[in-house]
Image (cartoon, coloured by chain):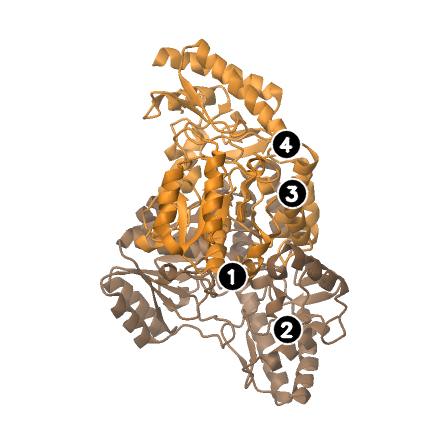
Chain colours: A orange, B brown
């Protein structure tokens, strides 16, 4: 039973008990609901468009999109058809299908800072490969990384240091996102040994307000790289194709040398990409990165179709429009009930935090009330909108927010 | 046109030229045919059972299985059906499907040294996670690694050092596979700082004869770990479920503490696994590893079906039986033509090398002759047999070998 008592999670809780026996801690990584307030289902049985169902048949209007990937909505018919068509021919051979060339061409056509592309599976594969290419091209070691930014879960970047040794991170120098002097100090510290600077598209760290990058900050990062013969790496794994289909910094006029994509580029099918500028082509061809499944043709078919749809239809406009409606609706409701909240970052990746809520007790209650009304929010991670979300969905969500916010205003 | 002039690779060569424009070096990693003698197609258009087709419609009886994964054959009907059934419900949600528990239970039931399991995407994810768990559990740093063993392509293990910094490998201590005194010396060097020893199931390094592990060597590795409170890691990514469905060292009576699986466990669908013994459950639950797609339910459906088929049918017996037939057939033919060859390692993962062939000129010619006869061999990487290979396929292959070996006997 959930804390709120309204949702029946009987089958979910039963399976969680069984999972404890077979899986360390019952579940690993970001999808473990142990890290969330009670009331969340651990397992899912079905998904379609903007909705997901748990094992007990509860349906939720979802605002996480599988933590990002499902940008066109779950089980998108066109993407699944493209995959099925490809699967009947070939998925994994002794080499890729012709789609690898089409997909590379497509992503290069779309993304402003892409002269070439290669593909992998995890976002972490892509960010790690960006570091390797930077080091290969410069012969230098140091990488500047923003404190608290998530770049994946390899030993060099995992947010939990358990099992990590100091050498895994000894070539990283940390700075504060959007803080020019701290970035300059980090670059100073790297001296003549700076290989690159890696930055998320915007500051989307968990458990705090999101921040769009200051243009002057991106410009400073670009200048440091140019003056020190280092490379600017855009980690666009989480934000890619939600902010701008030409690359998340396109409107800032800042061109990264390397960009890591994943999540949204395959609409849920496993794929990631590294794209880069011409002068890094040689280094990219000289490093050795690979994986047994990096050439799955079905994932490439999914990505090609997903990118084509995003090219044809203005997915970014759709989700940012909805995001603005959702944000102003939530703001209005909070204000009506006199609850102080903070919504930050790009509206297509909503983040709702409560003021004076250091222990997330308000945020936790809020999402629990929403779950009871069939709306799946996250208490401290940015959320995601998809092309499958509709205006009616937002009405449904805002009704639930109204109910939850009213409760919060009396609970606290 | 291929070097031999018999295979038309016109479309393939045309696309390779186009690929050069979009992909650094035209292709990355182990699937780049630039690393192979000319005559190999870079791209594939179709695959079924033990056969693959290139873009120009040439059909090859395949002995690589996509570099391992397709253990039941390409496009296995039962596996694809299980995947399609799952896809209609859910692939990637905000959490896994119930299949994650079924799959963990299944792999634990099969594998002798598995008390728990977690799942990832790449083989490299699994081997890296084994290192992290060993370090988390011991609080120690050093890992013993055999020179030349392939454990993946993360910076700590990639075989090409370009872009790798010394700190990536500074906690590795190297020894020679199957060499007890070199293993002891490495352990000595680690002193009180030994976290683990990682070993491939057998020595399957490229460009040299394969070697099954000496039991006394595995026993020594086990003893060192026990006496130094370190952990024995079996990298079963390449050999897993081809040698023994209970784990590759089951018949040796040596129990690893951690095992990394991938490739064959999903029959081509992207998945890897880490399994371990009870005493490492806590450490495995305390590290943080994850990936956007590690919970794809379709890959888990594929793996569950693949493992179930391997449980029901004796896939290992089938492929080792065929492997023996192939091996003795090739030996006989080579002997008939007076050509000195070496076949090594487990017969279900064939390796055919020529004596006095340091530059692989004989091996290269041999595989080119085979390609012309519609048989896809590898000149210096172990090959793979699948459950889809038949006795008739071997007749076909041996006819081609007869042709190629005769040519080699006159060419050199």
Mark 1: secondary structure:
loop
Q: In the rendered view of the protein, which quadrant contains the N terminus of chain A?
A: top left
- How far across and how far down the image is residue A311, in percent? 68, 38
Within 10 Å of the Cα at label 2, are there few (<14), some (14-19), or many (20+) other Cα atoms? some
Residues at marks 2 and 3 touching, judged by CB atoms closer than 8 Å: no
Position above or below: A349 against A268: above
Q: Chain of mark 3?
A: A
Residue identifier under label 1: A287
Residues at marks 2 and 4 touching, judged by CB atoms closer than 8 Å: no
Q: Earlier in the sequence, mark 3 or mark 4?
A: 3
Callout 1 and callout 3 share a chain: yes
User: Residue B1 appears in which quarter of the rendering?
Assistant: bottom right
Mark closer to the observer (1, 2):
1
Residue B37's tag is 2
Callout 4 and callout 1 share a chain: yes
Residue identifier under label 4: A315
Q: Earlier in the sequence, mark 4 or mark 1?
A: 1
Mark 4: secondary structure:
helix
In space, the residues marked 2 and 3 are separated at their CA atoms by 35 Å
Residue identifier under label 3: A110
Q: Is residue B141 toward the left or the right of residue B157 in the image? A: left
Q: In the rendered view of the protein, which quadrant contains the C terminus of chain A?
A: top left
Callout 3 and callout 4 share a chain: yes
- How far across and how far down the image is residue B38, in percent? 67, 72
What residue sits 54% from the left and 41% below the top? Answer: A254
């Amino acid at each position: 039973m959930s804390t709120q008592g309204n949702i029946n999670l009987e089958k979910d809780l039963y399976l969680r008990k069984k999972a404890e026996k077979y899986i360390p801690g019952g579940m690993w990584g970001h999808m473990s609901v142990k890290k969330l307030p009670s009331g969340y289902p651990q397992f899912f049985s079905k998904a379609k468009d903007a909705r997901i169902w748990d094992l007990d048949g509860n349906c939720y209007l979802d605002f996480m999109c599988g933590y990002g990937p499902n940008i066109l909505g779950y089980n998108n018919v066109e993407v699944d058809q493209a995959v099925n068509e490809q699967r009947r021919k070939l998925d994994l051979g002794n080499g890729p299908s012709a789609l690898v060339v089409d997909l590379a061409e497509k992503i290069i056509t779309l993304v402003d800072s892409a002269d070439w592309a290669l593909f992998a599976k995890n976002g972490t594969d892509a960010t790690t490969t960006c570091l390797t290419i930077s080091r290969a091209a410069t012969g230098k070691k140091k990488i500047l990384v923003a404190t608290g930014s998530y770049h994946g879960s390899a030993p060099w970047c995992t947010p939990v240091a358990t099992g990590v040794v100091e050498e895994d991170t000894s070539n990283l120098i940390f700075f504060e996102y959007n803080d020019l002097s701290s970035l300059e100090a980090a670059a100073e510290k790297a001296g003549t040994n700076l290989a690159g600077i890696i930055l998320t598209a915007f500051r989307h760290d968990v458990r705090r307000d999101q921040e769009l990058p200051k243009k002057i900050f991106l410009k400073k990062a670009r200048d440091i790289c140019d003056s020190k013969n280092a490379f600017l790496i855009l980690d666009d794994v989480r934000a890619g194709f939600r902010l701008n289909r030409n690359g998340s910094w396109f409107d800032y006029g800042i061109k990264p040398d390397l960009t890591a994509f994943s999540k949204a580029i395959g609409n849920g099918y496993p794929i990631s990409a590294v794209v880069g500028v011409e002068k890094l082509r040689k280094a990219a061809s000289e490093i050795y990165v690979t994986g047994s499944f990096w050439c799955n043709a079905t994932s490439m078919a999914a990505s090609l179709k997903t990118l084509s749809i995003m090219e044809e239809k203005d997915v970014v406009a759709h989700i940012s429009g909805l995001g603005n409606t959702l944000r102003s609706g939530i703001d209005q409701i909070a204000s009506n009930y006199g609850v102080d909240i903070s919504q930050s970052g790009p509206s297509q990746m909503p983040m709702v935090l409560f003021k004076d809520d250091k222990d997330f007790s308000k945020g936790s209650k809020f999402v629990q009330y929403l779950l009871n009304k069939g709306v799946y929010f996250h208490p401290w991670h940015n959320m995601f909108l998809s092309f499958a979300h509709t205006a009616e969905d937002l009405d449904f969500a805002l009704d639930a927010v109204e109910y939850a916010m009213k409760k919060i205003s009396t609970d606290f």
